[in-house]
Amino acid sequence: MSLSSHYKKGSIELACDEAGRGCLAGPVYAAAVILEKDHTNDLLDDSKKLNAKQRNSLRSWIEEHTTWAVGKVEPKEIDEINILNASFLAMHRAIDQIPKAFDHLLIDGNRFNPYHDKPHFCIVKGDGKFQSIAAASILAKSHRDQHMEELSQLHPEYGWSNNCGYPTVKHRAAIREYGITEHHRKSFQLLPKQLEIKW
């Protein structure tokens, strides 16, 4: 079943979603997307339900047929303001880049820091309900995955090209063996309590 094209018919909606909140390393990314009313795509879905080939194909379509932008917050900032605020800041940075006027925001999740005076609607699991939020989720994840692939070339021992910075067994084993990099989030529990490392 295809996702809904809009939350409020006749409105210009700017949808936002993030990627990388639960990672131990790398930035948190967010995307902002305005899906034009005459450019919908029934293949759009929650990025987590798609494989890399499907995401990259849809990323090309989104970047060609929508108004979009991507923002990010680096690990040092995440450590300073916490990951929830960093996720909202990444969304704000993406929204800042959108040149087109819009009526309201659609936010994936249940919380958001208001963006100026713009109305917003938080929608739990919105990336599986609305095409515009799904498009934002695809952009955020595909751009972040690409960035982690690039970082993996510098630090191949952590397996970021496969785990994208998430807390896999291989990633944590590499932290135990090699320590951490400037790309790790020091405020996160990088290892289980009994295996914590000294900074």
Image (cartoon, helix red, strand yellow):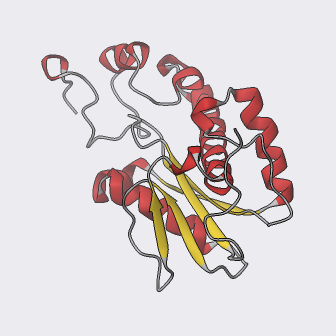
Q: Where is the C terminus found, in terms of image quarters? A: top left
Residue 105 location, x and y as percent? 55, 70
Which residue: 38% across, 57% down? 110
Give the camera-side residue of 184 and 2: 2
Left or right of 102 in this view: 48: left
Residue 130 location, x and y as percent? 62, 53
Which residue: 64% across, 34% down? 150
Residue 155 location, x and y as percent? 53, 26
Which residue: 47% across, 83% down? 116
Left or right of 75 in this view: 58: right
Which residue: 78% across, 44% down? 42
Left or right of 156 in this view: 195: left
Q: In this picture, is 193 found above or below 73? A: above
Left or right of 90 in this view: 67: right
Q: In this picture, is 18 found above or below 95? A: above
Residue 176 location, x and y as percent? 30, 16
Give the camera-side residue of 191 and 106: 106
Picture quadrant of residue 149: top right
